[in-house]
Image (cartoon, rainbow, N blue to C red):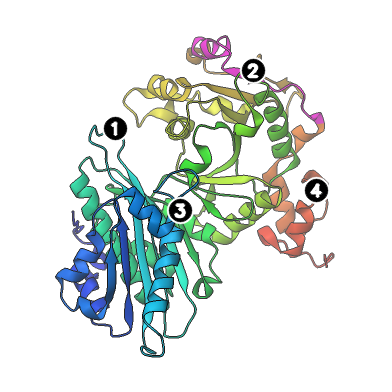
Amino acid sequence: MAIILPGDKEFEKRPSTERKALKINLNDGVYGTFAEIGAGQEVARHFFRVGGASGTIAKTISAYDKNFSDTIYGEEDDKRYVTEKRLHKMLSREIMLLESRIPKKIHPNKMFFAYANTVATIDFAKKFKGHGWMGIRYQPAPEQPYNEIMLHVRFHQTEARLQQEAIGIMGVNLVHGAFYSHDEPKKLLKYLYDHIDRSAIEIDTINFSGPLFEGIDNRILSLQLVKNGMTEAVMFNPQGNNVLPARALYKKNILVLRGSFRPVTKVNIDMFEKSFDIFIKEQQVKEKNTEVIFEITLSNLTAQGEIDESDFMDRAKLLGSLGHTVMISDFKEYYRMVDYLSKYTKEQLGLAMGVSNFVEIFDEHYYEDIDGGILEAFGKMFHNNLKVYLYPMKDLETGQIVTSNNLKLHPRMKDFYKFFKYNGKIVDIFEYENEYLSIFSREILNKIRNGNEDWMDQLPVGVAENIMKNNMFGWKSKKMKID
């Protein structure tokens, strides 16, 4: 399970799982409860093994029987047990019991904590690999308010024993990180994988809350999950809260718009509105069961080899202000994104894109890294109920409007393209706003940075004011201020 990368000095310096558990046990102030359901008492086991656990562990519990679990934590409306809501209940109840049974006046120097996980490991038929929630609610110092770290994991191993071991090690890393690395959340994220093969377990959602983390935006930490290769994609809602992709996408009709949104413009919103109008009229699609995603790829966030977090937050906040759900992914190729979405739904999928981006996906060089080339990629992309909603482009030289009927492809791709077009996989958007075809976000971005003021009417209502008020994208105009 443990992996030490040759030459990785930072990794080699990190303490072993045993040393981390012992350090917690030898801290006279740390005292609390371990509540683990579904993968054995793998986390608590590490603390018992190294010795000194009596100074750390007030109680361990593992309520495997559903009736016992419901009696302790309450029955869930949806009858599910491996959920974020269940984890919240576990943490809340264990802290309540800790405080009621161990009076603070007798132990004034104790920092109480409750660690909990609720996990479903791989099933006997090995069709479902399993997933789980884990978290810790704790005091960083005596008499201070509680803080919380919660995360969702997906298993990739094919043996329950290995999954149990992984959850045990990650749990120790979480407890140790909460007490000793809480001042550096980005490093704490990396430390969660100490002595675990990163391909063995995936973290696809994480949330920090409490006074310790007031200055932390969980969207930044979500971005780190993708950047560090801990997951392929993360999502957050219009309010800026991280959401579990599986929960948001499960059995949904999904319409995706990919872009830089730097900034989001009227053409982006027109593409969304017009494609959405067509999408919800598709057979079997119901609006109430439809999820719209504005997706930004990791490569789209990179500038000069590094991710500009301020620039990322500007885009995320603007999209959120317009009421949209945002996905950050590592899917450079569209077929990878479609393959990912297909894990969660078999319902209708839609991609809204402009002609120029659509032409690019027919470039064979785009697929040189996969054995089957473009044929394999398109097989994955169109095997499900996928349609492309094509937004037209204006040819800057001729002024001609380019649609699916007159776009230019390499001669070798023409018959390939016709197959998808005449099988109804490509749908033109005709009800578009002609004046929006001359709007380009890169030109607007340059004007913003240069302090110009002739770009505001090219953005959706409220966006320009938001940019100027908060000095987004480098806006520093001396001529105009928004109160």
- Seen at 68% across and 34% down, the residue is 272
| Magenta stretch: includes residue 432 | yes
Q: Which of marks 3 and 1 is nearer the N terminus?
A: 3
Crowd around label 1: few <14 · some 14–19 · many ≥20 (10 Å):
few
- Taking the image as drawn, is residue 305 in sight? no
Q: Give the range drawn in magenta.
A: 415-434
Residue marked by disc 4:
461
Which of the two marks, 1 or 2, is nearer to us in this view?
Answer: 1
Give amino acid for label 4: Val
Q: Earlier in the sequence, mark 1 or mark 2?
A: 1
Which of the two marks, 4 or 3, is nearer to us in this view?
Answer: 3
The label on residue 127 is 1
Q: In this view, does 105 lie to the left or right of 457?
A: left
Residue marked by disc 2:
404
30 over 259 or under it: above or below: below
Give amino acid for label 3: Glu
Q: Where is residue 212 in the image (x, y as percent from the top left)?
A: 49, 75
SS for callout 1: loop
Q: Is residue 474 left or right of residue 168?
A: right
